Each structure stands twice: as structure tokens, then as C-alpha cells.
Image: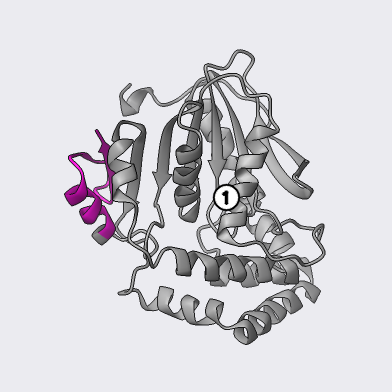
């Protein structure tokens, strides 16, 4: 399929629902095909606020012309309401949470796992546990290892590793939730959401201004940094190279081009450069 063919007139409404996954109330975005050939399970980055990705889920469904169902799974503890009474969830617990979601669904067709940022790492771990059910794993701007050259990432590491700083920042961000919604939207738009859609801005206002959400974002980040300080499992990627593809951008400090180059060295790679010259795909084979 060429890039010019990646469009469709097939449209369906995306459904947002709450799902009990191993006792954790979880936000799910989904759209079901009438006769799916496969099922896409999407794992977001951190924050795992799933409503942020509404347009993306719609686009995925349309991209496949109604031949695939799509489920986007939010993170435990990062819901609009404090369903888990402030419980904090680690990276490993979020991986287990996504596996429990799949186990609880009656998915009879093959799975395609798609992850963004740390969601790419989670998707790889899911691929490891689902060797027969999952037929492909796609990492979008994957966060697979610490980027010690990034000053921004180093700052986030210092905050996340400090319980005092994490709690203080979470309190300060949550206090913004007391402001009128239009003022809060403006703050998000001028700070972190300059390129965000209206849907994404609303998701940020409703979720990131919650103390329990910010605490979970930073606690999960702490466990991410500890785990991703280890060397990536190149052997597993080589063994499953026909099932894995990564997409990198030139300006993403979570998935820098240095990592793109390292993957290219570790594997025989088929490299593409998309229109605009700023996005690279590594398709392992």
C-alpha cells in the first residue's frame, strides 16, 4: 500500500467508556469494525490521558477502511476522577494493566500493537507476552532508553526522582484547576499545548489539573527512568524483527535520532524518509 492510498471514507463515532481492569477503573477509547481482519490496541505515552488521542483513533480507523477495530487504553490512576484513591502505579504495573485489559476482551482476530513514546516500550513488552496473538508492533517516537544529552529530560528526571519535588509540582499544577476553565485553557495553550487540538486542550484541562493524575504521571516517570537506564533488549528485537517497526522524528528528546541510528546499527534495517524530510521509519526485517 502506498502513502497515497492511506485514506478512507469510512467513518464511525469513537466511543469513550470506563472499563474495570483488574479492579482499576480505566478510560477506553474504541471504535469497532463490523467485520475486522485485525484489532489495533493503542498504548499512549505518559501522561496516558486517552481522550487526548480521540482524533488519532478516528484517523486510525479511517486509515484501515473499516477493516480493523481500534481500542486505545488509558493508564491506571490517570483518570479524570480519582477512582483509585491516590494509588500510584509503576511502569511494570501499567504493563500488567494493559495485559489484563486484553485478557478481559473477547478479541478473536490478530492484534496489532501501537504505542507512542513509553507506550512503545509497553507495547514491546506486550509483544513479548503475546507471541502468537500479536502479529505486529509499531512504536511511534519510541522512548526506549534514557537520553543523557537532553537537558529537558534531565530536568524531568530530577523532579520525578524527588518525592518532595514531585508532590510540590503536582500540588502547583492541581491548584490551576481552581481557575476558570477558559483561563486554564489559555495557560495550557501558551505553555505545553501550542499545537494541541481543542479536544487535546480539554483533555489536558480535565485531567492534568488533578493532583492524583500528576502524581501518577511523575511516579510512573520515576520507574521509567530506572528501567530505561538499562540497555535495551536487542536480542528480543532481533528475534522478532519481522514484527517490529519504529518511527522517529528529528526533534523528539524522548526518542532522539541517536537511538534511531543505534537501532539501525543493531539490526539490518529498511529505512524510509517520509515527506518533509523530518520523520524516519525503521522497519526491522
User: Which sits in the foreground, 173 or 198?
Assistant: 173
Residue 261 position in % (x across, y down): 21, 54
- Point out the stretch of residues depicted in magenta: 259-285
Give the residue drawn at x 74%, y 72%. Answer: 211
State how many labels appear. Answer: 1
User: Which sits in the foreground, 19 or 53?
Assistant: 19
Give the residue drawn at x 67%, y 81%. Answer: 167
User: Which sits in the foreground, 1 or 45?
Assistant: 45
Give the residue drawn at x 67%, y 39%. Answer: 101
The quadrant in which the N terminus is found is top left
Q: Is residue 275 magenta?
A: yes
- The answer to whether residue 183 is left or right of residue 264 is right
- Residue designated by label 1: 95
For mark 1, give the secondary structure: helix
Residue 70 position in % (x across, y down): 59, 31
- The answer to whether residue 284 is left or right of residue 244 is left
Q: Is residue 151 magenta?
A: no
Instruction: Check the image and report above or below for 9 versus 23.
Output: above
Query: Looking at the image, which residue sits at the far top?
Result: 35
Amino acid at each position: 500500500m502506498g502513502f497515497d492510498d492511506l485514506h478512507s471514507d469510512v467513518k464511525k463515532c469513537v466511543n469513550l467508556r470506563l472499563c474495570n481492569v483488574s479492579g482499576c477503573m480505566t478510560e477506553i477509547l474504541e471504535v469497532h469494525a463490523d467485520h475486522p481482519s485485525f484489532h489495533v490496541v493503542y498504548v499512549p505515552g505518559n501522561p496516558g490521558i486517552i481522550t487526548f488521542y480521540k482524533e488519532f483513533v478516528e484517523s486510525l480507523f479511517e486509515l484501515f477502511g473499516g477493516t480493523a477495530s481500534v481500542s486505545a487504553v488509558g493508564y491506571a490512576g490517570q483518570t479524570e476522577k480519582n477512582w483509585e484513591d491516590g494509588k500510584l502505579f509503576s511502569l511494570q504495573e501499567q504493563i500488567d494493566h494493559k495485559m489484563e485489559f486484553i485478557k478481559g476482551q473477547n478479541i478473536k482476530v490478530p492484534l496489532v500493537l501501537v504505542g507512542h513514546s513509553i507506550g512503545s516500550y509497553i507495547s514491546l513488552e506486550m509483544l513479548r507476552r503475546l507471541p502468537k496473538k500479536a502479529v505486529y508492533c509499531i512504536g511511534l517516537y519510541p522512548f526506549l532508553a534514557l537520553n543523557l544529552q537532553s537537558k529537558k529530560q534531565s530536568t524531568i528526571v530530577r523532579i520525578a526522582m524527588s518525592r518532595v519535588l514531585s508532590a510540590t509540582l503536582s500540588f502547583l499544577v492541581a491548584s490551576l484547576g481552581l481557575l476558570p476553565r477558559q483561563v486554564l485553557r489559555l495557560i495550557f495553550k501558551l505553555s505545553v499545548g501550542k499545537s494541541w487540538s481543542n479536544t487535546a486542550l480539554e483533555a489536558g484541562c480535565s485531567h492534568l489539573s488533578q493532583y492524583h493524575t500528576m502524581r501518577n504521571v511523575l511516579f510512573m516517570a520515576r520507574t521509567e527512568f530506572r528501567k530505561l537506564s538499562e540497555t535495551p533488549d536487542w536480542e528480543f528485537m532481533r528475534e522478532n524483527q519481522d514484527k517490529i517497526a519504529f518511527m522517529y522524528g528529528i526533534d523528539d528528546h524522548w526518542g532522539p535520532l541517536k537511538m534511531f541510528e543505534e537501532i539501525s546499527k543493531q539490526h539490518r534495517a529498511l529505512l524510509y524518509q517520509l515527506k518533509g524530510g523530518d520523520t524516519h521509519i525503521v522497519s526491522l526485517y
